[in-house]
Image: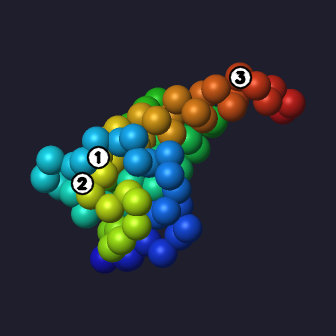
């Protein structure tokens, strides 16, 4: 399983997310979940978080954060960005 080494592990905006309560997404990278959500929101795709496709996270701010919440936050931001930057 891939391990996430991206800098978003330390992004302070993830401090606000709830801790993961266990389950499948527990060790997944919430930063990558956020990116995934943001992409989907920006591209106008339906929100569909898929924790199985995310790399594991070992350390940093987002360790053991709720990936579904991170995805939803990213999706929100992606949709907002899409509205702001309609340059086609
Ligand atoms: Zn990541």
The location of residue 71, given as percent across then percent down, is 42, 42
26 displayed left or right of 68: left
Instruction: Tell me how far mark 2 sits from mark 1, CA to CA.
Output: 7 Å
What element does badge 1 sit on? loop
Task: In the displayed orientation, state which residue is furthest to the right.
Answer: 87
The residue indicated by pointer 2 is 25
**Is the N terminus in the top left, top right, bottom left or bottom right quadrant?**
bottom left
The location of residue 69, given as percent across then percent down, is 35, 38
The location of residue 40, given as percent across then percent down, is 54, 39
Question: Residue 29 or 54: which is nearer the viewer?
Answer: 29
The residue indicated by pointer 1 is 66
Asked if the residues shown at circle 2 and circle 1 are in contact, with their CB atoms under 8 angstroms apart, the answer is yes
Earlier in the chain: of badge 2 and badge 1, it is 2
79 displayed left or right of 18: right
Question: Residue 80 or 12: which is nearer the viewer?
Answer: 12
Q: Name the mark nearer the viewer: 2 or 1.
A: 1
The location of residue 17, given as percent across then percent down, is 35, 42
Asked if residue 33 can be seen in this view, the reply is no
27 displayed left or right of 75: left
Earlier in the chain: of badge 3 and badge 1, it is 1
Up the image or down, 6 lies above or below 16; here it is below
Asked if residue 21 can be seen in this view, the reply is yes
Label placed on residue 83: 3
Question: Residue at horizontal 15%, vertical 47%?
Answer: 21
Instruction: Tell me how far mark 3 sits from mark 1, CA to CA.
Output: 26 Å
């Amino acid at each position: 399983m891939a391990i996430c080494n991206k800098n978003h592990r330390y992004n302070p905006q993830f401090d606000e997310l709830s801790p993961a309560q266990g389950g499948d997404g527990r060790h997944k990278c919430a930063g990558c979940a956020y990116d995934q959500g943001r992409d989907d929101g920006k591209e106008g795709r339906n929100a569909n978080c898929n924790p199985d496709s995310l790399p594991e996270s070992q350390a940093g701010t987002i360790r053991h954060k709720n990936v579904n919440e991170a995805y939803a936050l990213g999706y929100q931001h992606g949709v907002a960005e899409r509205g702001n930057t309609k340059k086609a």
